[in-house]
Amino acid sequence: MQNIDWGSLPFGYYPTNYNIRCYYRNGEWGELECCSETTINIHMAATCLHYGQEAFEGLKAHRGADGKVRIFRLDENAKRLQSSCDGICMPRFPMEKFEEAIIKCVQLNKEFIPTYESGASLYLRPLIIGTGARVGVKPADEYLFLVFATPVGPYFKGGFMANPYVITRKYDRSAPLGTGVYKVGGNYAASLRAHVEACHGGQYACEFYLDAKEKKYIDEAGAANFFGVKNNTYITPQSTSILPSITNKSLMQIAETLGMKVERRPVAEEELATFEEAGACGTAAVISPISRIDDPETGKSYTFGDGKPGPWCEKLYKKLRGIQTGTEPDEFGWNTFVEI
Ligand code: PLP
Ligand code: COI
């Protein structure tokens, strides 16, 4: 195991030993290849460079309290990557190949899997890019799948603590019939300006999106889904312009097992005033409780609790982390164990 201060890791890139690659040529995906290079040599007219033909995923491997290594909901990430491929006309990467690549990547970088006690994890970043040369706007004929691993700490500094968000009305991240439901690079390019402006000055942790068409309903909390809690009910937005979060899907099931009601439906901004607790959820964010959401253009401000994570956020977080690290039973069979 590497001599790293696991507990101080930020959510950033830390070099590891190997990545896994696979090439699509002549209409088919080839064999998985193990690689120690960190760079990619591609054609200057590759479609990923000009037309954003790129999709990615994010998932984590956790070292459990029992020392075993578990990957959370690997199959869901494999399926979502296929959906993203459909969304931007790339060939689907086969499910079994995806699972094999991720497991291999964890095994080859096993000394970078953080300790259980640190709360950090090994983040896996699979991606597919169009590498075939094109000048006209059309899909490439060649692609590269790649997955790298990097040990990460909390997405927000301080870990599990409540953060303030700011509604962005000036910029949209995705359109109702656009690519928001896919995990493609273009959505993140579209979000950068909103993110940089929201964080400027250090007052807010992240930007908060309303729906692009009416600016009335809640879409997402930066690179995470939103949920609110009131009357023992877990409420999360239904929208055609947000990423279907695997963490959110899991939390909806966990919430039911904790005795909560679950509602997935359009959530208007005014309803924020009625929530007892609110949070952002995602692989990187896990659960990040939200202390306050400001809407500077209308002057409205919505506050949740007393600035500390609320009781439901605590319970949901504990259960989710517990399943991921083996301190709670994996009753839904979400983990894939990795032999190391
Ligand atoms: N929404 C956006 C825009 C994201 O980038 C992410 C991160 O993957 C999520 C939501 C959360 O999704 P998941 O829980 O599958 O990581
Ligand atoms: C994730 O939660 O895995 C993400 O991809 C969010 C962000 C780092 C892009």
Image: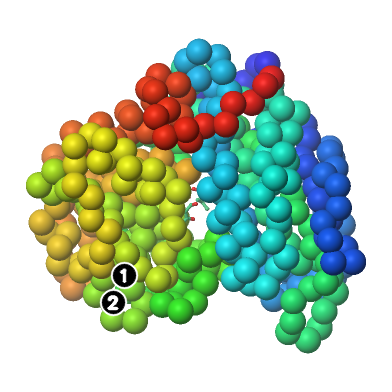
- Residues under numbered marks 2 and 1 in contact, where contact means CB atoms less than 8 Å apart: yes
State whether residue 295 is above or below residue 145: below
Q: Position of residue 195 (x, y in %)?
A: 44, 61
Q: Label 2: which residue? A: 215
Q: Secondary structure at mark 2?
A: loop
User: Residue 246 in the image: x percent, y percent?
Assistant: 45, 48
Q: Is residue 82 depicted above or below 111 in this figure?
A: below
Q: Position of residue 339 (x, y in %)?
A: 67, 21
Give residue 176's quadrant in the image: bottom left
User: Which residue is tagged 1?
Assistant: 210
What residue is rendered at 75% in x and 54% in y? Answer: 145
Q: Is residue 9 left or right of residue 146?
A: left
Quarter of the figure that contains the C terminus: top right
Q: Is residue 24 left or right of residue 231?
A: right
Q: Residue at x 52, y 72 (%)?
A: 179
Quarter containing the N terminus: top right
Quick one: label 1, few (<14), some, or many (20+) residues within 10 Å?
many
